[in-house]
């Protein structure tokens, strides 16, 4: 299979796992990295044996590069995606697809005009955990899905993150930070969303940073930090989701549960690739651990890039695609809009439920 040459733009913290994992796929060749901070790009290039470190402009001008992985900060996701597309390159972007819907739509339209692929994180739903849960649903182990619940509840990032202020500004908050993982998993399991509603609040207007180097700094909170929503899926199931940075006592709730007419499924943390997956049929007293379908566990970020590259070479559809990411982005904005407007948000976008995924060493040459 043809090898695609990859360039990474954005050499911050998240870039390391991509640079490590891209090397696990023989049909991907990481040839360049770029960052506004050139020293950071040179550091990552030396660390991971990348042939070239350069400016963003130089990377985009390199005609040998087929696909750009965009790991910049969210507010410039769309800008960098558009520049990559204009340069004739496919692009895979960290979540979210863009900061707002109009920019995200422009990215998808430009890609379609140019016949290029757009992919987006998260790709955790391709891991063994979510795919095992999907297999159980697909083969009828819980019969008809009737409901779902999802919980992402913690105390926020100011107690550990070195620079947590962004998480409490517009475009931040628990829904935009972690919602993509949970909503993408729910859509992978139950299909697209028809309508939703939300209630949101700022529980604590000011936060104090507890982590170094900014311990003691005060953060003025300008985005909602506790959001609860209801979801009507096109296929008929009704779900609930809560994302919160306001649980100072922690939480014991499961990440995701799927309720069916014949049983209940416990789905693992959608910010991971592994298990556990547990199933309880209607006549059983306890949940049973289910063996995972594959070895796609650990931190496998970048597997979405590999699957997208395979689709590019073979002309197939890929799973972690722009339409799915746009649908998730609209839903996240929809929860906030519903709360502000006291109305249901009826989804304007839709997407295909991703096909089940099984990694194959013959197809992906995963080492």
Image (cartoon, grey):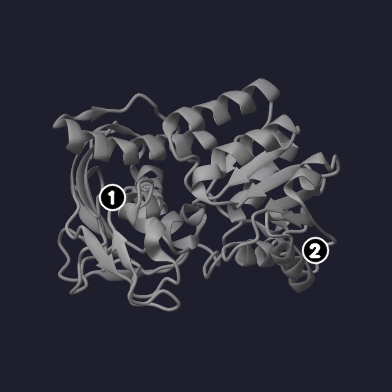
Residue 316 horizontal/vertical position (percent): 65, 34
Count of numbered badges drawn on the protein: 2
**Is residue 212 visible in the rendered structure shown here?**
yes
Earlier-in-chain disc, 2 versus 1: 2
| SS state under label 2 | loop
Farthest top residue? 113
| Label 1 packing within 10 angstroms: few (<14), some (14-19), many (20+) | some
* Figure quadrant of residue 264: bottom left
Q: Nearer the viewer, residue 67 or 226?
A: 226
The image quadrant where one finds the C terminus is bottom right
Residue 267 horizontal/vertical position (percent): 33, 60
Q: Determine the CA span between mark 2 and mark 1.
A: 40 Å
Q: Residue at x 42, y 56 (%)?
A: 130
Residue 50: mark in rendering: 2
In the image, is 221 to the left or to the right of 107?
left
Asked if the residue at tag 1 contacts the one at tag 2, i.e. Cβ–Cβ closer than 8 Å, the answer is no
Residue 355 horizontal/vertical position (percent): 50, 41
Q: Nearer the viewer, residue 161 or 116?
A: 161
| SS state under label 1 | loop
Residue 44: mark in rendering: none
Q: Residue at x 58, y 46 (%)?
A: 93
Residue 222: mark in rendering: 1
Q: Is residue 32 above or below residue 277?
A: above
**Is residue 319 visible in the rendered structure shown here?**
no
Residue 307 horizontal/vertical position (percent): 63, 48
In the image, is 113 to the left or to the right of 341?
right
């Amino acid at each position: 299979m043809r090898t695609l040459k990859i360039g990474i733009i954005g050499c911050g913290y998240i870039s390391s796992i991509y640079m490590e994992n891209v090397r696990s796929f023989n049909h991907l060749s990481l040839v360049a990295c770029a960052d506004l901070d050139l020293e950071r790009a040179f550091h990552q290039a030396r660390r991971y044996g990348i042939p070239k470190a350069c400016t963003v402009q130089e990377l985009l001008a390199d005609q040998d590069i087929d696909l750009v992985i965009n790991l910049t900060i969210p507010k410039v996701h769309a800008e960098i995606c558009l520049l990559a597309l204009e340069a004739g390159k496919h692009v895979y972007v960290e979540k979210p697809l863009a900061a707002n819907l109009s920019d995200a739509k422009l990215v998808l339209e430009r890609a379609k005009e140019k016949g290029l692929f757009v992919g987006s994180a998260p790709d955790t739903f391709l891991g063994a955990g979510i795919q095992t849960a999907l297999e159980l649903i697909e083969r009828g182990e819980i019969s008809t899905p009737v409901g779902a619940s999802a919980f992402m509840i913690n105390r926020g990032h100011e107690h550990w993150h070195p620079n947590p202020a962004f998480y409490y500004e517009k475009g931040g908050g628990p829904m935009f930070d972690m919602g993509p993982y949970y909503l993408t998993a729910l859509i992978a399991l139950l299909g697209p969303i028809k309508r939703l509603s939300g209630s949101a609040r700022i529980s604590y207007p000011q936060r104090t940073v507890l982590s170094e180097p900014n311990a003691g700094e005060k953060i003025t909170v300008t985005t909602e930090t506790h959001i609860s929503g209801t979801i009507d899926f096109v296929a008929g199931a009704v779900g609930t989701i809560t994302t919160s940075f306001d649980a100072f006592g922690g939480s014991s709730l499961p990440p995701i549960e799927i309720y069916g007419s014949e049983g209940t499924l416990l789905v693992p943390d959608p910010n991971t690739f592994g298990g556990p997956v547990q199933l309880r049929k209607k006549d059983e007293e306890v949940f049973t651990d289910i063996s995972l379908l594959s070895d796609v566990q650990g931190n496998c970020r970048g597997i979405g890039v590999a699957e997208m590259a395979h689709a590019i070479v073979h002309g197939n559809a890929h799973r972690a695609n722009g339409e799915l990411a746009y649908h998730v982005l609209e839903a996240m904005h929809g929860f906030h809009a519903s709360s502000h407007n006291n109305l249901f948000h009826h989804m304007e976008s839709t997407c295909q439920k991703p096909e089940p995924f099984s990694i194959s060493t013959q197809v992906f040459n995963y080492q």
